[in-house]
Amino acid sequence: MATCGLCNRPAVREWLDLGPQAITNRFLRSPDEPDYVHPCKLGVCRSCGTVQLASPVPVDEMRPRFDWISYNEPESHLDDVAEVITRLPGVTPASAVGGLTYKDESTLRRLNKLGLSHTWLARSREDLDIGSPAAGIESVQERLTVTAARGLAARYGRPDVLLVRHVLEHCHDVHEAFRAFRSLVRPGGCVVLEMPDARRALDRLDYTTIWEEHLFYFTPVTIRQALAVAGFEPVFLDSYFYTRENSLVVIARRRAEPPLAASPAELGDELARADRFVREFPAVRDAHRQRLRTFARARGKVAMLGAGHLSAAFINLYGLADVIDFVADDNPKKHGLLMPGSRLPILPSSELVTRDVKLCLMTVRPEIEDLVVGKNAAFTAPGGRLASVFPDSRYSLDKLDPAAGKAA
Protein backbone atom coordinates (compact mmCIF):
# COMPACT_ATOMS: atom_id res chain seq x y z
CA MET A 1 0.00 0.00 0.00
CA ALA A 2 1.08 3.58 -0.67
CA THR A 3 0.82 6.63 1.56
CA CYS A 4 -2.23 8.82 1.02
CA GLY A 5 -1.50 12.33 -0.16
CA LEU A 6 -4.24 13.72 2.10
CA CYS A 7 -4.42 11.76 5.35
CA ASN A 8 -0.78 10.57 5.31
CA ARG A 9 -1.75 7.01 6.20
CA PRO A 10 -0.27 4.02 4.33
CA ALA A 11 -3.71 3.02 3.12
CA VAL A 12 -3.89 3.60 -0.65
CA ARG A 13 -4.73 0.50 -2.65
CA GLU A 14 -7.44 -0.76 -5.06
CA TRP A 15 -5.34 0.39 -7.98
CA LEU A 16 -6.52 1.16 -11.49
CA ASP A 17 -3.29 1.00 -13.51
CA LEU A 18 -3.78 2.64 -16.90
CA GLY A 19 -0.15 2.29 -17.89
CA PRO A 20 2.04 5.02 -19.43
CA GLN A 21 -0.12 7.85 -20.78
CA ALA A 22 0.72 10.88 -22.91
CA ILE A 23 0.36 14.38 -21.45
CA THR A 24 -2.86 15.64 -22.98
CA ASN A 25 -1.66 19.22 -23.56
CA ARG A 26 1.42 17.99 -25.45
CA PHE A 27 0.28 18.31 -29.05
CA LEU A 28 2.82 17.01 -31.55
CA ARG A 29 4.15 19.04 -34.45
CA SER A 30 5.19 16.09 -36.60
CA PRO A 31 4.82 12.30 -36.73
CA ASP A 32 8.49 11.96 -35.77
CA GLU A 33 8.21 14.00 -32.55
CA PRO A 34 8.44 11.71 -29.51
CA ASP A 35 5.60 11.56 -27.01
CA TYR A 36 6.35 12.14 -23.35
CA VAL A 37 4.48 9.53 -21.33
CA HIS A 38 4.06 9.11 -17.58
CA PRO A 39 2.56 6.33 -15.45
CA CYS A 40 -1.16 6.81 -14.82
CA LYS A 41 -2.23 4.87 -11.76
CA LEU A 42 -5.33 5.68 -9.75
CA GLY A 43 -5.68 4.54 -6.15
CA VAL A 44 -8.25 4.63 -3.36
CA CYS A 45 -7.34 5.42 0.25
CA ARG A 46 -9.03 2.93 2.57
CA SER A 47 -8.66 5.35 5.48
CA CYS A 48 -10.18 8.59 4.13
CA GLY A 49 -11.85 7.39 0.91
CA THR A 50 -10.01 9.79 -1.39
CA VAL A 51 -9.43 8.80 -5.02
CA GLN A 52 -6.01 10.01 -6.15
CA LEU A 53 -3.26 9.59 -8.71
CA ALA A 54 -0.20 7.77 -7.47
CA SER A 55 2.57 9.76 -9.12
CA PRO A 56 2.44 13.41 -10.23
CA VAL A 57 3.89 14.40 -13.57
CA PRO A 58 6.97 16.63 -13.08
CA VAL A 59 5.99 20.28 -13.38
CA ASP A 60 8.47 20.99 -16.17
CA GLU A 61 6.88 18.21 -18.24
CA MET A 62 3.31 19.23 -17.40
CA ARG A 63 3.83 22.87 -18.37
CA PRO A 64 2.24 23.48 -21.80
CA ARG A 65 4.47 23.99 -24.84
CA PHE A 66 1.91 26.35 -26.42
CA ASP A 67 0.93 29.67 -24.86
CA TRP A 68 -2.56 29.60 -26.41
CA ILE A 69 -3.77 26.65 -24.34
CA SER A 70 -6.36 27.73 -21.78
CA TYR A 71 -8.99 26.17 -19.54
CA ASN A 72 -12.29 27.81 -18.67
CA GLU A 73 -14.28 26.90 -15.58
CA PRO A 74 -18.05 27.46 -15.24
CA GLU A 75 -18.83 30.68 -13.38
CA SER A 76 -22.58 31.22 -13.08
CA HIS A 77 -22.50 30.03 -9.47
CA LEU A 78 -20.01 32.75 -8.51
CA ASP A 79 -22.80 35.30 -8.00
CA ASP A 80 -24.07 33.15 -5.15
CA VAL A 81 -20.57 32.49 -3.81
CA ALA A 82 -19.84 36.22 -3.70
CA GLU A 83 -23.07 36.81 -1.77
CA VAL A 84 -22.12 34.08 0.70
CA ILE A 85 -18.70 35.67 1.24
CA THR A 86 -20.24 39.05 2.07
CA ARG A 87 -22.38 37.39 4.75
CA LEU A 88 -19.53 35.58 6.50
CA PRO A 89 -19.13 36.49 10.19
CA GLY A 90 -16.63 39.33 10.52
CA VAL A 91 -16.67 40.31 6.84
CA THR A 92 -17.36 44.03 6.42
CA PRO A 93 -16.76 46.61 3.65
CA ALA A 94 -13.35 47.14 5.23
CA SER A 95 -12.35 43.49 4.86
CA ALA A 96 -9.50 42.59 2.52
CA VAL A 97 -9.90 39.84 -0.07
CA GLY A 98 -7.03 38.26 -1.99
CA GLY A 99 -7.10 36.11 -5.12
CA LEU A 100 -4.39 33.58 -5.84
CA THR A 101 -4.73 33.12 -9.63
CA TYR A 102 -6.38 34.51 -12.74
CA LYS A 103 -9.31 32.18 -12.01
CA ASP A 104 -10.20 34.37 -9.02
CA GLU A 105 -10.41 37.62 -10.95
CA SER A 106 -14.10 37.32 -11.82
CA THR A 107 -15.03 36.60 -8.19
CA LEU A 108 -13.10 39.69 -7.09
CA ARG A 109 -15.06 41.78 -9.60
CA ARG A 110 -18.31 40.47 -8.17
CA LEU A 111 -17.16 41.30 -4.64
CA ASN A 112 -16.17 44.82 -5.74
CA LYS A 113 -19.73 45.35 -6.97
CA LEU A 114 -21.04 44.15 -3.60
CA GLY A 115 -19.01 46.74 -1.72
CA LEU A 116 -15.76 44.91 -0.93
CA SER A 117 -13.24 47.24 -2.52
CA HIS A 118 -10.07 46.16 -0.69
CA THR A 119 -9.00 43.39 -3.03
CA TRP A 120 -5.83 42.16 -4.67
CA LEU A 121 -4.86 39.50 -7.21
CA ALA A 122 -1.48 37.75 -7.13
CA ARG A 123 0.60 38.09 -10.30
CA SER A 124 2.29 35.01 -11.67
CA ARG A 125 5.63 36.55 -12.63
CA GLU A 126 6.10 39.27 -10.02
CA ASP A 127 4.56 37.55 -6.99
CA LEU A 128 5.03 33.84 -7.63
CA ASP A 129 8.21 33.94 -9.73
CA ILE A 130 6.64 32.03 -12.62
CA GLY A 131 8.49 33.06 -15.76
CA SER A 132 6.94 30.99 -18.55
CA PRO A 133 4.10 32.73 -20.44
CA ALA A 134 2.57 29.29 -21.04
CA ALA A 135 2.56 28.35 -17.35
CA GLY A 136 -0.71 27.40 -15.71
CA ILE A 137 -1.97 25.96 -12.46
CA GLU A 138 0.70 23.26 -12.56
CA SER A 139 3.24 26.03 -11.91
CA VAL A 140 1.09 27.91 -9.38
CA GLN A 141 0.75 24.84 -7.17
CA GLU A 142 4.53 24.43 -7.17
CA ARG A 143 4.90 27.98 -5.84
CA LEU A 144 2.19 27.58 -3.21
CA THR A 145 4.58 27.50 -0.25
CA VAL A 146 4.89 29.19 3.13
CA THR A 147 7.73 31.32 1.77
CA ALA A 148 5.59 32.53 -1.13
CA ALA A 149 2.68 33.19 1.23
CA ARG A 150 4.84 35.35 3.45
CA GLY A 151 5.96 37.29 0.40
CA LEU A 152 2.34 37.91 -0.63
CA ALA A 153 1.46 39.01 2.90
CA ALA A 154 4.38 41.44 2.94
CA ARG A 155 3.36 42.93 -0.40
CA TYR A 156 -0.42 43.08 -0.06
CA GLY A 157 -1.17 42.52 3.60
CA ARG A 158 -2.87 39.48 5.09
CA PRO A 159 -6.39 39.12 3.70
CA ASP A 160 -9.52 38.32 5.67
CA VAL A 161 -10.64 36.10 2.79
CA LEU A 162 -8.42 34.24 0.33
CA LEU A 163 -9.83 32.91 -2.96
CA VAL A 164 -8.32 29.70 -4.34
CA ARG A 165 -10.32 28.36 -7.29
CA HIS A 166 -9.32 25.09 -8.95
CA VAL A 167 -5.85 24.77 -7.45
CA LEU A 168 -6.04 22.27 -4.58
CA GLU A 169 -6.80 19.27 -6.82
CA HIS A 170 -3.55 20.04 -8.70
CA CYS A 171 -1.29 20.25 -5.64
CA HIS A 172 1.62 17.87 -5.37
CA ASP A 173 1.88 18.76 -1.66
CA VAL A 174 -1.56 19.55 -0.26
CA HIS A 175 -0.20 19.97 3.27
CA GLU A 176 2.27 22.66 2.23
CA ALA A 177 -0.59 24.42 0.45
CA PHE A 178 -2.64 24.50 3.66
CA ARG A 179 0.39 25.72 5.60
CA ALA A 180 0.67 28.52 3.04
CA PHE A 181 -3.00 29.41 3.57
CA ARG A 182 -2.44 29.58 7.33
CA SER A 183 0.56 31.85 6.86
CA LEU A 184 -1.25 34.18 4.50
CA VAL A 185 -4.76 34.59 5.91
CA ARG A 186 -5.38 36.71 8.99
CA PRO A 187 -6.28 34.89 12.22
CA GLY A 188 -9.97 34.10 12.05
CA GLY A 189 -9.98 34.57 8.27
CA CYS A 190 -11.34 32.19 5.65
CA VAL A 191 -10.10 30.38 2.57
CA VAL A 192 -12.56 29.92 -0.29
CA LEU A 193 -11.71 26.73 -2.16
CA GLU A 194 -13.32 25.47 -5.35
CA MET A 195 -12.74 22.21 -7.18
CA PRO A 196 -14.65 19.72 -9.35
CA ASP A 197 -17.08 17.50 -7.46
CA ALA A 198 -16.04 14.03 -8.62
CA ARG A 199 -19.13 12.17 -7.42
CA ARG A 200 -21.06 12.20 -10.70
CA ALA A 201 -18.07 11.17 -12.81
CA LEU A 202 -17.30 8.31 -10.44
CA ASP A 203 -20.94 7.22 -10.28
CA ARG A 204 -21.49 7.24 -14.04
CA LEU A 205 -18.14 5.55 -14.74
CA ASP A 206 -16.83 8.47 -16.76
CA TYR A 207 -13.13 7.73 -17.07
CA THR A 208 -12.43 10.88 -19.07
CA THR A 209 -12.44 12.58 -15.66
CA ILE A 210 -8.99 11.07 -15.08
CA TRP A 211 -6.58 13.85 -15.98
CA GLU A 212 -2.88 13.92 -15.26
CA GLU A 213 -3.20 17.48 -13.93
CA HIS A 214 -5.70 16.46 -11.22
CA LEU A 215 -4.05 14.44 -8.47
CA PHE A 216 -7.15 14.35 -6.24
CA TYR A 217 -10.81 13.64 -7.07
CA PHE A 218 -12.68 15.33 -4.25
CA THR A 219 -16.21 14.81 -3.00
CA PRO A 220 -17.91 16.68 -0.14
CA VAL A 221 -16.86 13.92 2.26
CA THR A 222 -13.23 13.74 1.19
CA ILE A 223 -12.68 17.52 1.10
CA ARG A 224 -13.96 17.66 4.69
CA GLN A 225 -11.45 14.94 5.52
CA ALA A 226 -8.66 16.95 3.90
CA LEU A 227 -9.63 20.08 5.81
CA ALA A 228 -9.73 18.22 9.11
CA VAL A 229 -6.26 16.74 8.64
CA ALA A 230 -4.93 20.22 7.79
CA GLY A 231 -6.52 21.79 10.87
CA PHE A 232 -9.39 23.55 9.09
CA GLU A 233 -13.16 23.25 9.27
CA PRO A 234 -15.82 24.17 6.72
CA VAL A 235 -18.10 27.09 7.52
CA PHE A 236 -19.84 26.69 4.16
CA LEU A 237 -19.94 23.80 1.69
CA ASP A 238 -22.11 23.40 -1.40
CA SER A 239 -21.99 21.59 -4.72
CA TYR A 240 -23.29 23.77 -7.55
CA PHE A 241 -24.99 21.86 -10.33
CA TYR A 242 -23.65 21.87 -13.88
CA THR A 243 -24.63 19.39 -16.54
CA ARG A 244 -21.07 18.16 -17.13
CA GLU A 245 -19.50 18.41 -13.68
CA ASN A 246 -20.61 20.10 -10.46
CA SER A 247 -18.48 22.78 -8.82
CA LEU A 248 -17.68 22.02 -5.19
CA VAL A 249 -17.19 25.18 -3.11
CA VAL A 250 -16.02 25.11 0.49
CA ILE A 251 -15.23 28.06 2.74
CA ALA A 252 -12.88 27.02 5.53
CA ARG A 253 -11.23 28.50 8.58
CA ARG A 254 -8.69 27.19 11.05
CA ARG A 255 -9.97 24.76 13.64
CA ALA A 256 -8.66 24.64 17.20
CA GLU A 257 -10.38 21.39 18.22
CA PRO A 258 -9.36 17.90 17.06
CA PRO A 259 -10.43 17.07 13.50
CA LEU A 260 -13.82 15.56 12.78
CA ALA A 261 -13.61 12.21 11.00
CA ALA A 262 -16.12 10.98 8.45
CA SER A 263 -18.74 8.65 9.84
CA PRO A 264 -18.41 4.92 9.04
CA ALA A 265 -21.46 5.21 6.76
CA GLU A 266 -19.97 8.16 4.85
CA LEU A 267 -16.64 6.41 4.45
CA GLY A 268 -18.39 3.23 3.35
CA ASP A 269 -20.28 5.12 0.64
CA GLU A 270 -17.07 6.75 -0.62
CA LEU A 271 -15.23 3.44 -0.76
CA ALA A 272 -18.11 1.69 -2.53
CA ARG A 273 -18.24 4.44 -5.18
CA ALA A 274 -14.48 4.41 -5.69
CA ASP A 275 -14.18 0.62 -5.74
CA ARG A 276 -16.87 0.34 -8.42
CA PHE A 277 -15.06 2.97 -10.50
CA VAL A 278 -11.83 0.99 -10.32
CA ARG A 279 -13.51 -2.37 -10.90
CA GLU A 280 -15.65 -1.49 -13.92
CA PHE A 281 -13.02 0.14 -16.14
CA PRO A 282 -12.24 -2.93 -18.31
CA ALA A 283 -15.93 -3.50 -19.06
CA VAL A 284 -16.53 0.15 -19.99
CA ARG A 285 -13.39 0.27 -22.15
CA ASP A 286 -14.28 -2.93 -23.97
CA ALA A 287 -17.87 -1.81 -24.55
CA HIS A 288 -16.69 1.43 -26.19
CA ARG A 289 -14.20 -0.46 -28.37
CA GLN A 290 -16.78 -2.99 -29.49
CA ARG A 291 -19.49 -0.40 -30.22
CA LEU A 292 -17.24 1.88 -32.27
CA ARG A 293 -15.51 -0.90 -34.18
CA THR A 294 -18.87 -2.42 -35.06
CA PHE A 295 -20.12 0.97 -36.25
CA ALA A 296 -16.99 1.60 -38.34
CA ARG A 297 -17.29 -1.79 -40.05
CA ALA A 298 -21.01 -1.42 -40.72
CA ARG A 299 -21.34 2.29 -41.50
CA GLY A 300 -18.03 4.03 -42.14
CA LYS A 301 -15.56 6.49 -40.67
CA VAL A 302 -15.60 7.76 -37.08
CA ALA A 303 -14.09 11.08 -35.96
CA MET A 304 -14.04 13.21 -32.82
CA LEU A 305 -15.00 16.86 -32.35
CA GLY A 306 -12.81 19.01 -30.12
CA ALA A 307 -9.05 18.56 -29.69
CA GLY A 308 -8.98 18.96 -25.92
CA HIS A 309 -7.93 16.82 -22.99
CA LEU A 310 -11.32 15.07 -22.75
CA SER A 311 -11.04 13.82 -26.33
CA ALA A 312 -7.44 12.77 -25.74
CA ALA A 313 -8.45 10.87 -22.62
CA PHE A 314 -11.33 9.13 -24.40
CA ILE A 315 -9.11 8.02 -27.26
CA ASN A 316 -6.06 7.07 -25.22
CA LEU A 317 -7.62 5.44 -22.16
CA TYR A 318 -9.98 3.29 -24.23
CA GLY A 319 -7.40 2.48 -26.92
CA LEU A 320 -9.35 3.91 -29.85
CA ALA A 321 -6.57 5.32 -32.05
CA ASP A 322 -7.20 2.62 -34.65
CA VAL A 323 -10.92 3.45 -34.82
CA ILE A 324 -10.91 7.26 -34.94
CA ASP A 325 -10.00 8.76 -38.32
CA PHE A 326 -9.10 12.28 -37.11
CA VAL A 327 -10.05 14.94 -34.57
CA ALA A 328 -12.00 17.96 -35.81
CA ASP A 329 -11.39 21.37 -34.25
CA ASP A 330 -11.94 24.85 -35.66
CA ASN A 331 -9.16 26.50 -33.67
CA PRO A 332 -6.69 27.34 -36.46
CA LYS A 333 -3.77 27.17 -34.01
CA LYS A 334 -4.37 23.44 -33.67
CA HIS A 335 -4.55 22.68 -37.39
CA GLY A 336 -1.65 20.60 -38.60
CA LEU A 337 -0.83 19.35 -35.11
CA LEU A 338 -1.26 15.77 -33.92
CA MET A 339 -3.10 14.59 -30.84
CA PRO A 340 -0.91 13.44 -27.95
CA GLY A 341 -0.68 9.70 -27.58
CA SER A 342 -2.82 8.67 -30.55
CA ARG A 343 -1.01 10.93 -33.06
CA LEU A 344 -4.31 11.51 -34.86
CA PRO A 345 -4.36 14.60 -37.11
CA ILE A 346 -6.28 17.71 -36.02
CA LEU A 347 -8.28 19.12 -38.94
CA PRO A 348 -11.05 21.70 -39.50
CA SER A 349 -14.60 20.48 -38.90
CA SER A 350 -15.30 20.92 -42.64
CA GLU A 351 -13.31 17.71 -43.09
CA LEU A 352 -16.18 15.77 -41.53
CA VAL A 353 -18.02 16.21 -44.82
CA THR A 354 -14.98 16.08 -47.09
CA ARG A 355 -13.82 12.78 -45.60
CA ASP A 356 -17.32 11.31 -45.56
CA VAL A 357 -17.36 10.69 -41.82
CA LYS A 358 -20.46 8.86 -40.61
CA LEU A 359 -20.14 9.33 -36.83
CA CYS A 360 -18.54 12.18 -34.92
CA LEU A 361 -18.10 11.95 -31.15
CA MET A 362 -18.54 15.05 -28.97
CA THR A 363 -16.98 15.93 -25.61
CA VAL A 364 -18.74 19.29 -25.24
CA ARG A 365 -20.83 20.31 -22.23
CA PRO A 366 -24.44 19.09 -22.53
CA GLU A 367 -25.81 22.63 -22.27
CA ILE A 368 -24.18 23.59 -25.58
CA GLU A 369 -24.72 20.32 -27.46
CA ASP A 370 -27.73 21.64 -29.38
CA LEU A 371 -25.71 24.66 -30.45
CA VAL A 372 -22.85 22.43 -31.64
CA VAL A 373 -25.25 20.19 -33.53
CA GLY A 374 -26.78 23.24 -35.20
CA LYS A 375 -23.37 24.53 -36.27
CA ASN A 376 -22.60 21.20 -37.90
CA ALA A 377 -25.76 20.95 -40.02
CA ALA A 378 -23.65 20.46 -43.16
CA PHE A 379 -22.42 17.23 -41.59
CA THR A 380 -25.70 15.98 -40.14
CA ALA A 381 -27.97 16.91 -43.10
CA PRO A 382 -26.66 14.14 -45.39
CA GLY A 383 -26.88 11.60 -42.56
CA GLY A 384 -23.80 12.18 -40.38
CA ARG A 385 -24.37 11.43 -36.69
CA LEU A 386 -23.15 13.44 -33.71
CA ALA A 387 -22.95 11.49 -30.43
CA SER A 388 -21.72 12.46 -26.99
CA VAL A 389 -19.23 10.30 -25.11
CA PHE A 390 -21.03 11.16 -21.86
CA PRO A 391 -23.65 8.59 -20.82
CA ASP A 392 -26.15 11.10 -19.38
CA SER A 393 -26.34 13.19 -22.56
CA ARG A 394 -29.44 12.94 -24.72
CA TYR A 395 -27.01 12.46 -27.63
CA SER A 396 -25.19 9.70 -25.75
CA LEU A 397 -23.19 7.18 -27.70
CA ASP A 398 -24.89 4.53 -25.54
CA LYS A 399 -28.13 5.26 -27.42
CA LEU A 400 -26.61 4.49 -30.81
CA ASP A 401 -27.24 1.20 -32.60
CA PRO A 402 -23.72 0.43 -33.89
CA ALA A 403 -24.88 -1.59 -36.88
CA ALA A 404 -27.65 0.68 -38.06
CA GLY A 405 -26.27 4.04 -36.91
CA LYS A 406 -29.66 5.01 -35.52
CA ALA A 407 -30.78 5.90 -32.04
CA ALA A 408 -31.55 2.71 -30.15
Image (cartoon, rainbow, N blue to C red):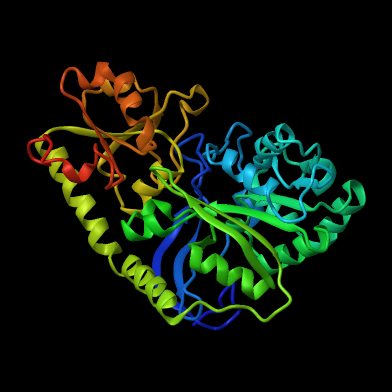
Specify whether 328 is left or right of 263. left
Residue drawn 59% across the image and 38% down it: 79
Q: Nearer the viewer, residue 195 or 353?
A: 195
Specify whether 268 is left or right of 7. left
Q: Nearer the viewer, residue 369 or 87?
A: 87
Q: Nearer the viewer, residue 181 or 235?
A: 235
Residue drawn 72% across the image and 58% down it: 190
Mark yes or no: residue 129 visible: no
Which quadrant would the C terminus be assigned to in this image? top left
Q: Position of residue 129 (x, y in %)?
A: 81, 47
Q: Position of residue 172 (x, y in %)?
A: 64, 63
Q: How many marks do you count on the picture?
A: 0
Location of residue 377 with respect to 275 vertically, above or below: above
Q: Position of residue 279 (x, y in %)?
A: 30, 70
Task: Name the image quarter holding residue 407.
Answer: top left
Q: Nearer the viewer, residue 102 or 224?
A: 224
Task: Name the image quarter holding residue 158.
Answer: bottom right
Residue drawn 65% across the image and 44% down it: 136
Location of residue 4 with respect to 58 vertically, above or below: below
Mark yes or no: residue 291 visible: yes
